[in-house]
Amino acid sequence: MSVTTTATPPAPTVAPPLPDGLVAVVKRECATCVLVTPVLAQLASAPSVTLSVFTQDDPDFPDGISSMHDDDLALSWHHDIETVPTLLRVEGGREVGRIVGWSRPEWEAFTGVADLGPGLPEWRPGCGSLSVDPNLADDLRVRFTGSTLRGRRVELASLEDEWEAMFDRGWTDGLPVVPPTEARVLRMLEGTTRHPQDVVAIVPPDLVAVTVEKVAVNAVMAGCKPEYLPVVLAAVEAACNDEFNIHGVLATTMPVGPLIIVNGPIRRAIGMNSGINVLGQGNRANSTIGRALQLVIRNVGGGRPNEVDRATHGNPGKVGWCVPEDEEGSPWTPLSVARGFPAGMSTVTLFPAEGPRCVVDQLARDAGQLATSFAAALRTVHHPKLPLGFDAVLVVGPEHARVFADAGWNREQLVAELDARLQLPGSEIIRGAGGMAEGIPERLRDATLPKFRPGGLLVVHAGGGAGLFSTVIGGWANGAIGSQPVTKEITS
Amino acid sequence: MSTIIIDPTGERSVVERTLTERPVSLEGRVVGLLDISKPRGDIFLNRIEERLTGLGAKVLRFKKPTFTKPAPVDLRHEIAMQCEVVIEALAD
């Protein structure tokens, strides 16, 4: 049993004021700062200049020049000093100009003082500011921006194992999660330009407003890197609306969960895998983005298995499932473009997905024959005698796609050819036909019904280069009564 | 040293309400039955209506547009305004 203690968040900090005149920020550890020490001495004695020097490390640096110690790096942090030496020009407390590193002509022009640093080289690059030192940046971010986080601070007891503590509080999906410390959450928030308190969506089933900050907390727990956060945010938005209806997808007894299909340049920018084992494990972005969405549903929305989640069986993809399309190797336009979004735009498409099943056809070299194999497999989605009620995703492997490409079939033609092969005669699918009770009402005996409604079959190109296989992923109750696939732009 | 983490939940504080007193009898009471729009739910509810009417209750029937989504706010309000007793149940 865990005892939760609420801790106090850090107090807000304000930027230390900058003195008017020239302000130099330096550190002894930087060879260029040491190099410009005589220049700073020249400036300090120049009648036309008021110089204030701040040193980040050694309070006695620069030798022989009066300086102030930025010992907690507050001045450097708040004034975005990334390089030392940095020389600022300040008027009325506001920065009006800045140069970094050492360049004689630049310093002379900036200060209005001639003949600076005789005998020094013309130019030397600066060094990294201590305030952006990777070893310090996390702590500094907590100290100076931690107060922007609004979430309740939970202090784990010193004898609690922090990983076990996450399980004890019911915050995991059954696998370990990364404890969302302030430093990790703030680092995650660096992945977006959105304000931490922006509301992203109202999350079912408890209908709780989720902020960018809370999404970031759950993204940390899922194991995401900051650059994945925009994808997670777009996925949360795409899932939590009346159209996608994550409430129903969560609550249903059917074995479905949200599958996120990613298109556009962000796939490569964050290193997603659209090739070998694309639907499986092994790639951090693929594995954690979908998990972050599911943790948001669980922790923020209150959607937990055996509570509002009533799935009879569920499927392993419900831990989290995120798949990029292989656009580079595809003979077709990307799925996002087929769904009306501009080429080159990064998007997520949410689909209520059951587990994947393989379609083997290693013999067909003719597009028509291969389409007939696909149709036979697609007909079985949820039940071979149930038309129209469920959508599906068809993940076409590269070796299969080549058969269609050789025949000149584009995406639209493939979908049309499949549709033509999936017109189901009423007599075959009425209740009782074929010795199966399941089926459509007897009154539709003379009708012909398509397996999929228009737009109900989503084709995605992905997978490894070897293997004449494709994959079918069945959906859930579709349309206005259930769930519609939803595509949203991913923004920074 | 202790670790401080950020609460990942919605941090809801739910208002607790006392249950309305249970009626001793349904005689003369208005009972609402909500059909969640699952196939064949109407067959089950027709039978329940028969039984309740037999007990002297007045039965009002309501229907959700789809079983996959929560009842719309207006429908919930309508039920709350018109009924004295609600039988809430879920079947699949």
Image: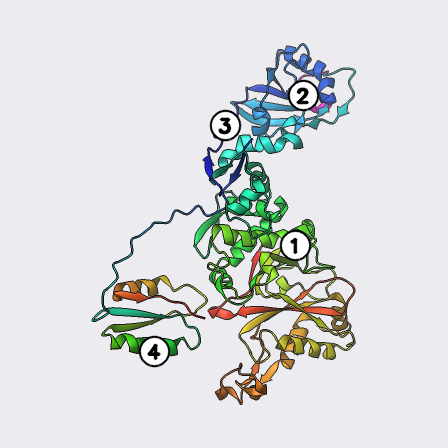
Colour convention: rainbow
Find out whether the residues at labels 2 and 3 contact each other: C-beta distance under 8 Å: no
Give the mark, 1 or 3, whose residue is nearer the N terminus: 3
Circle 1 sits on which residue?
A286
Q: Residues within 10 Å of mark 3 (few under 14, many from 20)?
A: few
Spatial CA span between label 4 and label 3: 68 Å
Q: Position of residue A343 (x, y in %)?
A: 65, 59
Q: Are marks 4 and 3 on the same chain?
A: no
Name the residue nearer the viewer: A84 or B90.
B90
Q: Nearer the viewer, mark 1 or mark 4?
A: 4
Give me the disc on residue A370: none
In this orientation, does residue A154 appear?
A: yes
Assign a secondary structure to mark 4.
Answer: helix
Which residue is depicted at the point 61% across and 14% down?
A67
Q: Nearer the viewer, mark 1 or mark 3?
A: 1
Q: Amino acid at mark 1?
A: Asn
Q: Position of residue A209 (x, y in %)?
A: 45, 50
Q: Are marks 2 and 3 on the same chain?
A: yes
Find out whether the residues at labels 1 and 3 contact each other: C-beta distance under 8 Å: no
> Subunit of mark 4?
B
Circle 4 sits on which residue?
B46
**Above or below A437: residue A403:** above
Q: Amino acid at mark 2?
A: Lys
Q: Position of residue A425 (x, y in %)?
A: 58, 86
Find out whether the residues at labels 4 and 3 contact each other: C-beta distance under 8 Å: no
Q: Which residues are magenta?
A: A104-115
Q: Nearer the viewer, mark 2 or mark 4?
A: 4
Q: Main secondary structure of the magenta part?
A: helix
Assign a secondary structure to mark 2.
Answer: loop
Give the mark, 2 or 3, whose residue is nearer the N terminus: 3
